[in-house]
């Protein structure tokens, strides 16, 4: 006596593949969201902190904020987004600062290399990643939930 059953697994495999594609597209979309968030954070300039006080020949006191340095916005312009890419089961999302545009960028915003006068004022890339981690995780969860709901 023999009992035999056959089933066509093609529909189930197609459904799994559809979910896989949907999740991958959701993670790429999350990468776009994350790079937008990081770009805003890395391009943010700290407020000027110095108060400049001067006395003219008539004894009048003048004060103004700033240390006389005029910001050019070059560091802000050096930050760019790289399109998210898939490597295996991983989606890579990144933003970069061009050393050709702002050769001093690492001394202002790179962890471990940041110059002492920028510490505590300018965020480093590591600080931005750590500060935005909960938001990034929430973005990924939300995108994945929407993708899985759409394929079921």
Image: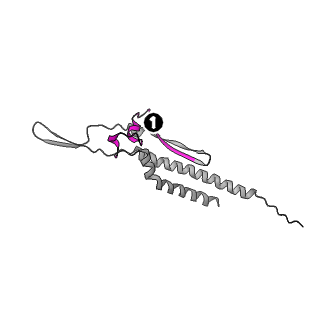
Secondary structure beneath dot 1 equals loop
The residue depicted at 59 percent of the width and 45 percent of the height is 86
**Dividing the picture into quarters, in which one does residue 61 lie?**
top left
Q: In front: 136, or 76?
A: 136
Please identify the residue farthest to the right as the structure is shown. Answer: 1
- With respect to residue 139, does 121 lie above or below? above
Q: Residue furthest left?
A: 58
- State the scheme by which the image is colored: one colour
The magenta segment is 91-120
Q: Is residue 101 magenta?
A: yes
* Residue 48 placement (x, y as % from top left): 29, 44
Quadrant position of residue 59? top left
Identified at 47% across, 40% down, the residue is 96
Residue 25 horizontal/vertical position (percent): 59, 51
How many labels were placed on the picture?
1
Q: Which residue is mark 1?
A: 98
Q: Quadrant of residue 119?
A: top left
Residue at screen point 88% across, 65% down: 2
Extreme-front residue of the structure:
112
On the rendered image, what quadrant is the N terminus found in?
Answer: bottom right
Horizontal arrangement in the rendering, residue 14 relative to residue 97 (left or right): right
- Per the image, is 73 magenta? no
Q: How many residues crowd mark 1 within 10 Å: few (<14), some (14–19), many (20+)?
A: some
Q: Is residue 119 left or right of residue 7?
A: left
């Amino acid at each position: 006596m023999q009992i035999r059953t056959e089933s066509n697994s093609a529909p189930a495999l197609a459904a799994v593949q559809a979910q896989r594609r949907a999740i991958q597209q959701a993670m790429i979309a999350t990468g776009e969201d994350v790079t937008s968030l990081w770009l805003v954070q890395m391009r943010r300039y700290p407020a000027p902190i110095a108060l400049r006080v001067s006395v003219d020949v008539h004894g009048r006191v003048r004060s103004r904020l700033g240390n006389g340095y005029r910001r050019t916005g070059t560091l802000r312009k050096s930050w760019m987004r790289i399109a998210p890419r898939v490597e295996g089961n991983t989606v890579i999302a990144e933003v970069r600062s061009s050393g050709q545009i702002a050769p001093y960028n690492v001394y202002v915003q790179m962890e471990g290399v940041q110059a002492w006068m920028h510490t505590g004022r300018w965020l480093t890339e590591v600080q931005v990643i750590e500060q935005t981690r909960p938001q990034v995780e929430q973005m990924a969860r939300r995108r994945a939930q929407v993708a899985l709901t759409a394929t079921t």
